[in-house]
């Protein structure tokens, strides 16, 4: 009966089942202390960079705006710590580029309390436009990793009425448990954020999808659901990448997102539980996003867990606090399937960082292998959740036939989930090939 119940739960076609490594799900969220200096990049979201509104030598309070949005697809940033603006200069960031950043030297007596605040908003009296503006004022972006400005995603075009708000509580990446802990510890904030998002996008109904390996989170949220049945929670099958937008739409609504179509065009807005939980914490107090929950884990971490980390905290400081071992050889920001390895520990934690994973040499050797030619086994085709042909795309990428990839094999349909690389017996780095191909195609189109 249990096997039958498993297959009856909604899901999507194909996908993979990597080892979970979710031990930190049992550890409560802990606050991380302030580093001596915090670095806040002005470009830590998709869209246009923010513009600094402070000057060197200025004293700032924790929560005070320090950079304003520079356009619609842009968000402001707020001081993560009370201190003095020490510099506004180029600093290295997680994507390898140097970005203009605000460096704040923390006061030695700085408190974790938010000192800069405005009157509590009367949420019941707000219009959808006012909610969207407050979301932008908060500096909120998608905390699942995409970092797209949340207000822009909630403001669907009027020509496309929204019927469903889908809330992604799957957290299907191995190791990551930050969303799980937020659902367990702050379910009331999640429901408050869901209500705000429903009002902003005009959705009459919200559906929260949670993988069935998180029964405690499902139970915690069910206890806080409103009695009007406008918000519901649904257990979906544990499978990667269940949390991706097309997959969640398929699982919860039984509808396929057509190629090239955005979710809002079929009346759907998808948001991450972490994003909405933070909205539920911030908007009632008209505060900005100055910290986020991050999973710090991996074989080379001696004190793994979920930490509430101030935005701008240097990665080196985080690893010192979490007890990194000497055998560490690789650090990945995000999850092991879609995250990116970094070359420097001098980059700061940004709004886009959901996880920090540190691997030792033995763990890396187990994950890696020598690259061999494609043996045409078809495993990558069997697991691709978008029904693409990663094998053919990989061979075209090896020959640098990027235009053929884009025109004949729907390269843009790949959202880089990593399923193909995960199952490839030849250890071909398919996702890396596809990322390079996409970048070349975009540059050619722009030219």
Image: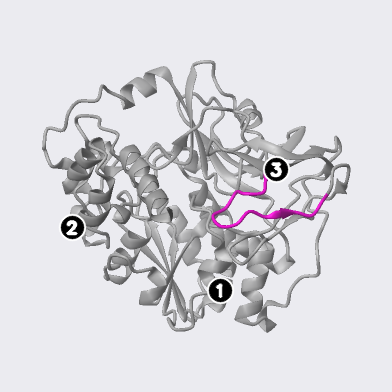
Local SS, label 1: helix
How far from the left and from the top, in percent, is residue 382? 16, 47
Q: Residue at x 48, y 43 (%)?
A: 25
**Disc 3 marks which residue?**
101
**In the image: residue 128, left or right of residue 19:** right
The circle on residue 4 is: 2
Q: Of 257 and 117, which appears nearest the observer?
A: 257
The numbered mark, 2 or 1, whose residue comes first in the sequence reads 2
How far from the left and from the top, in percent, is residue 135? 63, 67
The numbered mark, 3 or 1, whose residue comes first in the sequence reads 3
Residue 296 seen in the figure: yes
Q: Is 5 located above or below residue 350 in the figure? A: below
The numbered mark, 3 or 2, whose residue comes first in the sequence reads 2
Q: Residue at x 36, y 43 (%)?
A: 435
Q: Nearer the viewer, mark 3 or mark 1?
A: 3
**In the image: residue 399, left or right of residue 180:** left
Q: Are marks 2 and 1 in contact (CB under 8 Å)?
A: no
Q: Is 181 located above or below residue 334 in the figure? A: below
Disc 3 to disc 1, C-alpha distance: 34 Å
Which quadrant, please, contains the N terminus? bottom left
Q: Are marks 3 and 2 in contact (CB under 8 Å)?
A: no
Q: Are marks 3 and 1 in contact (CB under 8 Å)?
A: no
* Crowdedness near tag 2: few (<14), some (14–19) or many (≥20) residues, C-alpha within 10 Å: few
| Image quadrant assignment for residue 257 | bottom left
Residue 386 seen in the figure: no
How far from the left and from the top, in percent, is residue 375? 12, 32
Local SS, label 3: strand
Residue 111 covered by magenta stretch: no
**Disc 1 marks which residue?**
195
* Crowdedness near tag 3: few (<14), some (14–19) or many (≥20) residues, C-alpha within 10 Å: many
| Stretch of the chain drawn in magenta | 39-54
């Amino acid at each position: 009966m249990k096997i039958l119940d498993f297959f009856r739960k909604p899901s999507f076609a194909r996908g993979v089942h990597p080892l979970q490594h979710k031990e930190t799900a049992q550890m409560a969220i802990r606050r991380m202390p302030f580093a001596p200096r915090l670095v806040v990049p002005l470009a830590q979201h998709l869209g246009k960079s923010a513009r600094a509104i402070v000057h060197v030598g200025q004293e700032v309070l924790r929560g005070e705006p320090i950079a304003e949005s520079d356009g619609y697809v842009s968000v402001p940033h707020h001081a993560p710590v009370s201190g003095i603006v020490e510099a506004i200069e180029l600093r290295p960031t997680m994507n390898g580029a140097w970005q203009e950043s605000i460096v704040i030297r923390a006061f030695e007596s700085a408190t974790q309390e938010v000192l800069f605040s405005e009157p509590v908003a009367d949420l019941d009296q707000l219009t959808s436009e006012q909610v969207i503006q407050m979301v932008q004022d908060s500096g909120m972006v998608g905390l699942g990793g995409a970092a797209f400005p949340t207000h822009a995603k909630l403001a669907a075009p009027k020509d496309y009425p929204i019927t469903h708000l889908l809330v992604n509580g799957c957290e299907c990446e191995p190791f990551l448990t930050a969303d799980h802990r937020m659902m367990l510890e702050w379910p009331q904030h999640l429901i408050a954020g869901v209500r705000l998002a429903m009002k902003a996008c005009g959705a009459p109904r919200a559906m929260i999808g949670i993988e069935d390996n998180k029964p405690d989170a499902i139970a915690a949220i069910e206890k806080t659901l409103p009695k009007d049945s406008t918000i519901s929670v649904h257990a979906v099958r544990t499978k990667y990448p269940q949390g991706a937008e097309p997959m969640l739409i398929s699982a919860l609504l039984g509808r396929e997102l057509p190629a090239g179509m955005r979710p809002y065009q079929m009346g759907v807005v998808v948001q991450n539980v972490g994003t909405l939980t933070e909205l539920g914490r911030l908007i009632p107090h008209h505060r900005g996003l100055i910290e986020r929950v991050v999973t710090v884990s991996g074989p080379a971490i001696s004190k793994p867990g979920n930490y509430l980390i101030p935005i701008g905290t240097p990665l080196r400081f985080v690893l010192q606090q979490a007890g990194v071992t000497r055998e560490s050889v690789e650090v990945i920001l995000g999850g092991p399937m879609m995250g990116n390895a970094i070359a420097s520990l001098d980059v700061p934690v940004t709004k886009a960082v959901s996880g920090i994973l540190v691997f030792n040499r033995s763990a890396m050797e187990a994950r890696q292998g020598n690259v061999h030619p494609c043996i045409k086994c078809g495993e990558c085709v069997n697991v691709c959740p978008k029904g693409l042909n990663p094998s053919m795309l990989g061979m075209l990428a090896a020959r640098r036939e990027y235009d053929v990839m884009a025109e004949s094999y729907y390269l843009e349909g790949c959202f880089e989930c990593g399923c193909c690389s995960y199952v490839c017996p030849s250890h071909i780095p398919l996702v890396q090939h596809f990322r390079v191909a996409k970048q070349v195609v975009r540059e050619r189109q722009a030219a």
